[in-house]
Image: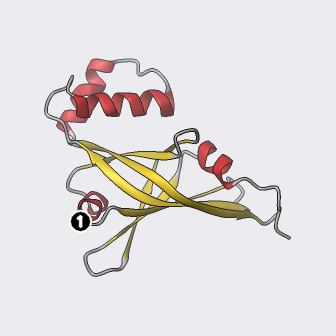
Amino acid sequence: MTDTSFNPRALLAGSRLGVLATIKSDGRPQLSPVMPYYDQQADVIYVSMTEGRAKTANLRRDPRATLEVTSPDGWAWATAEGRATLIGPGTDPHGPEVEALVDYYRRAAGEHPDWDEYRSVMVSDRRVLMVMTVDHVYGAKIR
């Protein structure tokens, strides 16, 4: 029986693990485990990723993306679809690309114990911030 009071946006907001689907050049889906942060008020999903990975290359070619999360017990799921913008990678630890990653981290996890180290790693790892504007959300709670 499906729970009609289920709010998929609330599940998205509470989930820190999900699967991001992007579109390969041959049209098939590329699935990647990610650690998303969903800003419910702005209706935007953020994911930190590395330049040069399949999902990053796919999004640079085709910005359409889908994120799915599930409840810990597996009986509820939520899917968000939208278009992604990529910010970065940055070359300056205090530049706008890295500042966007700092803002993402603060929203998703709070304060970092060593911001200088974090900034340095974001540059050396060539980190990119995906900002996905959500167009459509759906899901269900089965139990």
Q: Where is residue 68 in the image (x, y as percent from the top left)?
A: 54, 61
Q: Is residue 2 above or below residue 15?
A: below
Total numbered labels placed on residues in the image:
1
Give the quadrant of the N terminus: bottom right
79 with respect to 129 (left or right): right
Between 132 and 70, the one lying in front of the other is 132
The residue under the point 67% across, 53% down is 72
The residue under the point 78% across, 66% down is 142
Q: Is residue 85 above or below residue 103?
A: below
Q: Mark 1 points at which residue?
A: 61
The answer to whether residue 41 is visible is yes
The residue under the point 22% across, 42% down is 88
Between 139 and 53, the one lying in front of the other is 139
The answer to whether residue 36 is visible is no
Q: In which quarter of the image is residue 101?
A: top left
Q: Where is residue 107 in the image (x, y as percent from the top left)?
A: 48, 30
Give the quadrant of the C terminus: bottom right
Furthest-left residue in this view: 91
Q: Position of residue 20 (x, y in %)?
A: 44, 60
137 with respect to 20 (left or right): right
Q: In which quarter of the image is residue 87?
A: top left
Q: Is residue 99 above or below residue 136?
A: above
Which color scheme did the rendering employ for the protein?
Answer: secondary structure
Q: Quadrant of residue 97?
A: top left
Q: Position of residue 125 (x, y in %)?
A: 22, 40
Tag 1: residue type? Arg
Callout 1: 10 Å neighbours few (<14), some, many (20+)? Answer: few
Is label 1 in a helix, a strand or a loop? Answer: helix
